[in-house]
Amino acid sequence: MEAIRNYIQANRERFLDELFGLIRIPSVSAAEANRNDMVRAAEYIRDLLLTNGADRAEVHATDGHPIVFGEKIIDLSLPTILVYGHYDVQPPEPLEKWTTPPFEPEVRDGKIYARGADDDKGQLFMHLKAFEMMTATNTLPCNVKFMIEGEEEVGSVNIASFCTKNKEMLRSDVILVSDTTMISTATPSITSGLRGLSYIQVEVEGPDRDLHSGLYGGAVLNPCNVLCEIVASLKDRDGKITIPGFYDNVIVPTAAERAKMAERPFDQEVYMKSVGVEALAKEKGFTALESVGIRPTLDINGIWGGYTGEGAKTILPSKASAKISMRLVPDQKAEAIADLAIKHIKSLAPAGVKIKAEYLHGGQAYVSPLDTPEYLAAERAYEQVFGKRPIPVRSGGSIPIISTFESILNVKSILMGFGLEGDAIHSPNENYPLENLFAGMEAIPLYFKYYTELKRKG
Amino acid sequence: MEAIRNYIQANRERFLDELFGLIRIPSVSAAEANRNDMVRAAEYIRDLLLTNGADRAEVHATDGHPIVFGEKIIDLSLPTILVYGHYDVQPPEPLEKWTTPPFEPEVRDGKIYARGADDDKGQLFMHLKAFEMMTATNTLPCNVKFMIEGEEEVGSVNIASFCTKNKEMLRSDVILVSDTTMISTATPSITSGLRGLSYIQVEVEGPDRDLHSGLYGGAVLNPCNVLCEIVASLKDRDGKITIPGFYDNVIVPTAAERAKMAERPFDQEVYMKSVGVEALAKEKGFTALESVGIRPTLDINGIWGGYTGEGAKTILPSKASAKISMRLVPDQKAEAIADLAIKHIKSLAPAGVKIKAEYLHGGQAYVSPLDTPEYLAAERAYEQVFGKRPIPVRSGGSIPIISTFESILNVKSILMGFGLEGDAIHSPNENYPLENLFAGMEAIPLYFKYYTELKRKG
């Protein structure tokens, strides 16, 4: 670890320059206007891999944004670790809420502020530099592959077919992913579970144009009112989701498991203050933390319809739309849940409006066993870097491709995340502490070392 | 009437040029960017009045957009008609739905297409030209005054104080307003009642920034979901509004009055087809037409919150907002209803969100008696131009200042509207048939004639 620490110290400024170069490319996968930036970001990573010692590294075209693949094979009898990450980022809007522009990284108070600083450019960059350091110091203990995609924020649309087509090329023993959080550097944790996601978009269409709300209000159904009524009916007063069949496949952890999870330190006041609210929500029968970690939810991610400018426009809008996502837990299936939701929402349409609804993307939930070499290697690496054994945590977020990897490549993933909840990923002023960035660079080579040792013993 | 018809025929092209000049000024009162255009439109009307024979005409500054006043006094012993109109227009958005640009008027199939073609530039222009024609043909039978404002579409904020300050200048026997519709030229009608309006804006604020919907969804209340729940609860399954006290002052017309109103020809299929819906709404216990004409309503005019761009952004939004308007009937008071609504909405806020709500504007409902010289003169003018006695109709729209005029100036208004329901006012592709424009120019001088005669007899 000493050699790695010294290496980081000696190359700190260059590392930051390289990361900032990647961040400055506005690789927003949801925005058509940024299509060329996606290619630029992919090539940037390919070039880093080649410079840092990869045997091969290339940009693979897909039907959407490209995927970067790279590898260094030192001995086929040794384990192979496949590093997964994504170079695409969430849209930066609302721009006016950023203190400094989202694609102009700035270090303030020991944190890098920028879109992608954490999610996932900052975190994937730790792997690129860990790779450079192991290669440069001749300490790479096993084979390594990289698969870095550009569509994680829009549903990883093309990675499944990429995996299917390239099973042999992607063959590995474990997939290492840094795209999650830990509680803090004082209380390290490893994400041992993720929720799934089922994201749909709904449009309620009423009259064929915006109408005068006085001349028609009362006789013509208002799509905005109808949308609100439908959305409001999707949850009951206890916070239970009312879509028929929604809970059919939900696995509720045992009382013992829930007791263990409850040991996680949680200061409700600090939590509420960190997001600026005075009370928390929760599903009846579960704590707020359980509602995020082990229970499915339904949230509107966006809603729009009618006149939204300044002043008062008296229209009865023609249409209203909402983006609605459901977070899933084992064993809910993303597409099946979307089907149930869409069917139910359509059944709620009163005569006088039409409803269009489509499934945008999703993925299954994930839970990791805690007694495998894959998990134990991570536990030891964290313990050595942070001086404390990490707590396994079930997180509310989703990385839908984890279940895809398992089903197509038949490989388990380990979520070695170094972000913090305060990093404001997906929000204005996203940031990533330098402390976490460099701790990650130390922990990853340790993971490679322990994993190789544990696999040899096993 | 012959002289007037010939005058119109001889000056038709010039009339259209003058109207198009007014329409081309984008006098959108709700948009700060159009502030100078408001002054330009006011001066345009002042200049027309002076050119057309007014003794005086001037642009009066207010705290908002200016008001044009003009007059021609021929004999103080004769009645005085005060013409009211407005030169401001609704915002033209959504622009992409217009076949031709909103402020570039074009005649297609006998209709003028443009924002303001009907509401209210086209309709107020009929009065300017009726005035020109009566002056030019020496047939002006009484005194005439004009008060043309620029804030009708944003609540006529400053006209009340203008009236209060200028009571003497505005002294008149009747106020003539062309800002409403008729059923058709084959079935003429006069608006004998208007609904009032109470327009509010509501903002639900949750976390202090957009959050990651996976990491927080379930534990943090979602303002979009909360807004939907609140809005949905404002009406029950029967279409009744649930705000406590909302119906306290509602006057329900007698069974005899409702029977007379029901004589109005109404083809539900044609009505539904005209707006592109397959079923109508209504309040329980009332027909669809009654729900528009004699019952109060609540409509969302606009709703917004969270991510509304392309693709899927997984945020739990910080805020959600809605513009909500209630149409009122006698004797509901606009501000009192807004107070009730805001109080009720705030009372619905669950712990974990904050609600801001403000009253944007409004006005009282209006009902005209049918046996006065003011109404009878209009009835005769329509009968002579269209060959059929007009039906009195209670309309769902609002012109809040009508009740203001009554309370401050103590003068009744008559709503001589010549628009059609298909004119798409407040919508893309607003239009006004040339037939109606010119019929209005014929009917207005007849109103002046009959009103003066009836008042002399009276």
Image: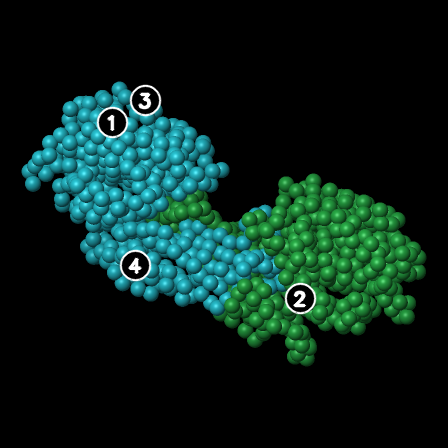
Chain colours: A cyan, B green
Q: Residue at x 28, y 27 (%)?
A: A48
Q: Nearer the viewer, residue B164 or B322?
A: B322
Mark 2 lies on residue = B395
Mark 3 lies on residue = A13
Q: Comparing marks 1 and 4, which lies closer to the viewer?
A: 1
Tag 2, which secondary structure? loop
> Is B63 displayed left or right of B321 in the figure?
right
Within 10 angstroms of label 3, few (less than 14), some, or many (20 or more) residues?
Answer: few
Image x and y of residue A250, in percent: 26, 59
Within 10 angstroms of label 4, few (less than 14), some, or many (20 or more) residues?
Answer: few
Residue B260 falls in which quadrant of the image?
Answer: bottom right
User: Which residue type carries mark 1?
Assistant: Leu
Q: Are marks 1 and 2 in contact (CB under 8 Å)?
A: no
What whole-number distance in Å separates the C-alpha atoms at marks 2 and 4? 48 Å
What whole-number distance in Å separates the C-alpha atoms at marks 1 and 4? 42 Å
Q: Earlier in the sequence, mark 1 or mark 4?
A: 1
User: Which residue type carries mark 4?
Assistant: Ala
Q: Which mark is residue A50?
A: 1
Q: Are marks 3 and 4 in contact (CB under 8 Å)?
A: no
Image x and y of residue A117, in percent: 35, 34
Q: Which residue is the extreme one toward the top?
A: A10
> Are the residues flagged by discs 1 and 4 from a single subunit?
yes
Image x and y of residue B157, in percent: 69, 51
Q: Which mark is residue A336?
A: 4
Residue B146 appears in the picture as rendered:
no
What whole-number distance in Å separates the C-alpha atoms at marks 3 and 1? 20 Å
> Are the residues flagged by discs 3 and 1 from a single subunit?
yes
Identify the subunit bearing mark 2.
B
